[in-house]
Amino acid sequence: AYERLTILHSGNVGVGITNPASILHVESATPTVTVKGTSTASSKVNLINGSVTWSLENQYVGGATTNMFRIYNSSLGADALTIHRANNNVGIGSTNPQAKLDVAGNVNIGSTTSSAPTLNLIKSTSGVAEIKFLNVSNEKASIQLDAAEDLQIFANTSQKIKLRSGGADTLTLDSSQNATFAGGTIIKSNGVVYLGYTDSTGIGGNKLEVNGNIYGSGNATFAGNVTVNGGGITLGGT
């Protein structure tokens, strides 16, 4: 006869093994343990230690199509991880994940011992790889590697794109495609350049306008008129 169930004096129970090494020890070529809830009940396994209970649960919520697998942390009273039945979307801190990975909170990549932490976005041959920035559900901006493998930065029509250094703006691109550099350089979308200005409001329509002195160490060639209002021009050549 073959022993199917063994209970040792220590209390260890073995199923398919005669010398169980733990409270419950199941062993076979392809061991399977089934925990099934009846009707609309959820099936659950609780792992209890000290003040916290970790629950592994097939949660039945509102119908079969909304079943979730979840890992629940009783100490925080919240799900640590959920997997949606309908699409296998994984949520960390999110109970209704809307993407393959949906994280509600901060994400750290790498560690103090990692010399080169890397985040890879892999695109198909004809597809795109994209990072989107949203306000609740509305897309505000994105960074995209397009199908031609050119890097593009997008912003909504009312948004600006800014590069910052040391807590200050170094370059601002507005919705009209004008560029403003820290220190007083403005390049308009029509090719007009302002030097020494922080605001182009009320400035004339010349192709180049300078607020301050101009110094040149080479030759200067002008095909049109040159007007100087105050300040001065110093040229080291002709």
Image (cartoon, rainbow, N blue to C red):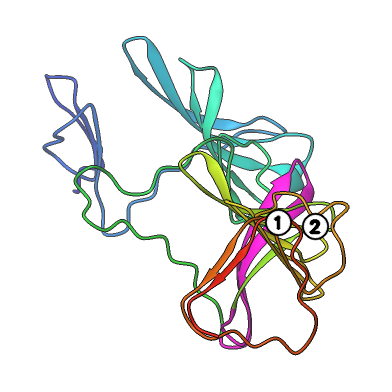
Measured as percent of width and height from the top left, residue 116 is found at 26, 58
Residue type at mark 2: give it: Asn
**Which residue is nearer to you in this view: 161 or 67?**
161
| Distance of label 2 from label 1 (alpha carbons) | 6 Å
Check disc 2 and report its element: helix, strand or loop: loop
Task: Name the image quarter holding the C terminus.
Answer: bottom right
**Label 1 crowd bin: few (<14), some (14–19), many (20+), radius 10 Å:** some
**Label 2 crowd bin: few (<14), some (14–19), many (20+), radius 10 Å:** few
**Which residue is nearer to you in this view: 19 or 155?**
155
Check disc 1 and report its element: helix, strand or loop: strand
Residue 156's disc is: 2
* Residue at position x 49%, y 68% in the image: 121
Instruction: Please give left or right for residue 60 compared with residue 63 in the image.
Output: left
Residue 208's disc is: none
Q: Is residue 41 above or below residue 156?
A: above
* Residue at position x 80%, y 80% in the image: 225
Instruction: Please give left or right for residue 66 compared with residue 111 in the image.
Output: right
Measured as percent of width and height from the top left, residue 188 is found at 77, 67
Boundaries of the magenta span:
125-150
Instruction: Please give left or right for residue 101 compared with residue 200 in the image.
Output: left
Q: Is residue 28 above or below residue 176?
A: above
Instruction: Please give left or right for residue 97 compared with residue 6 in the image.
Output: right
**Which residue is nearer to you in this view: 234 or 207?**
234
* Residue at position x 65%, y 33% in the image: 38
Q: Which residue is mark 1?
A: 141
Contact, CB < 8 Å: mark 2 with mark 1?
yes
* Res. 86 in view: no
